[in-house]
């Protein structure tokens, strides 16, 4: 419509601004099913609109990337948004193969909610997100050093919170027990048998008072 031509640039700028803000604060790729036909056409004409990134956005999460973000001149608020998005990405893309990431994802979401609700300030949120990012980096390094698969490492991460002198062989032993009951997640008989076998091994490690809680945590782990 020719009468709308004078407003097209302003409308396009608003679409770009909206997309940038939405991209900064969401942790998942955003697709608006309610988007208007006119806006869809603008997006097709300006393919960069949904590709806008935060300053110093990191594309992967490793020791070098985390250090670069820490040393960058971007504001603490932008660093918080960057780390929140990156943590959500690695949890979403890698947790199926690395069950221990689910715990990191849960804690990251609680930090994000507390930050959005102004229960914690930017500096606290940044510090907590940096700790989670470092935990992810350290976990990848530790798994490689231990030379274990994802299931064994997930078990190891649970047990080491309760067992000070845990050995990797103890985690391997428990993983072997799980392997004997492949259908325990939907077969109640197998689950009951698995639980009984886990009690035998877990109780000497953590004591009777913590045996049930630790076993329940182990049973909640996703197997890959």
Image (tube, helix red, strand yellow):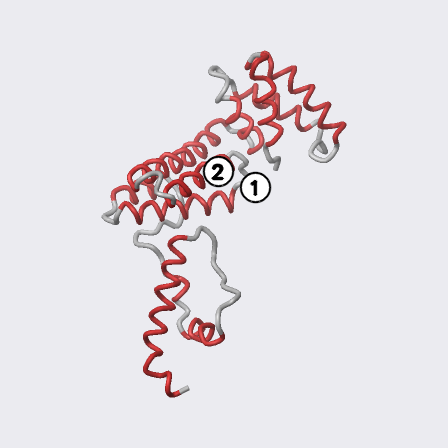
Residue 143 horizontal/vertical position (percent): 48, 31
Point 69% across, 24% down: residue: 194
Q: How many marks?
A: 2
Residue 41 horizontal/vertical position (percent): 46, 75
Which structural element holds mark 1?
loop
Q: Nearer the viewer, mark 2 or mark 1?
A: 2
Q: Which residue is mark 2?
A: 106
- Of mark 2 and mark 1, the one earlier in the sequence is 1
CB atoms at circles 2 and 1 under 8 Å apart?
Answer: no
* 117 or 101, nearer to the observer: 117
> Could you tell me how far apart the alpha carbons at marks 2 and 1 are, in whole angstroms?
14 Å
Q: Which residue is mark 1?
A: 96
Q: Is residue 9 above or below residue 2?
A: above
Residue 169 horizontal/vertical position (percent): 56, 20
Taking the view exactly as shown, the residue that stands out farthest to the bottom is 2
* 18 or 195, nearer to the observer: 18
Report which quarter residue 185 is drawn in. top right
């Amino acid at each position: 419509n020719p009468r709308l031509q004078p407003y097209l640039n302003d409308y396009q700028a608003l679409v770009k601004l909206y997309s940038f803000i939405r991209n900064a604060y969401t942790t998942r790729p955003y697709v608006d099913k309610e988007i208007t036909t006119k806006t869809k056409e603008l997006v097709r004409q300006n393919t960069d609109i949904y590709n806008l990134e935060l300053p110093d956005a990191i594309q992967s999460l490793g020791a070098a990337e985390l250090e670069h973000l820490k040393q960058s001149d971007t504001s603490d608020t932008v660093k918080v948004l960057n780390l929140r998005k990156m943590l959500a990405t690695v949890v979403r893309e890698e947790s199926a193969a690395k069950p221990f990431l689910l715990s990191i994802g849960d804690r990251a979401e609680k930090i994000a909610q507390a930050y959005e609700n102004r229960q914690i300030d930017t500096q606290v949120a940044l510090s907590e997100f940096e700790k989670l990012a470092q935990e992810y980096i350290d976990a990848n390094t530790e798994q490689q050093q231990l030379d274990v698969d994802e299931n064994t490492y997930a078990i190891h991460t649970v047990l080491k919170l309760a067992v000070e002198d845990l050995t990797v062989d103890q985690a391997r032993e428990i993983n072997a027990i799980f392997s004997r009951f492949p259908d325990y997640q939907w077969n109640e008989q197998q689950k009951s048998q698995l639980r009984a076998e886990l009690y035998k091994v877990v109780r000497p490690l953590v004591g009777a008072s913590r045996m049930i809680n630790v076993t329940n945590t182990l049973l909640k782990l996703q197997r890959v």
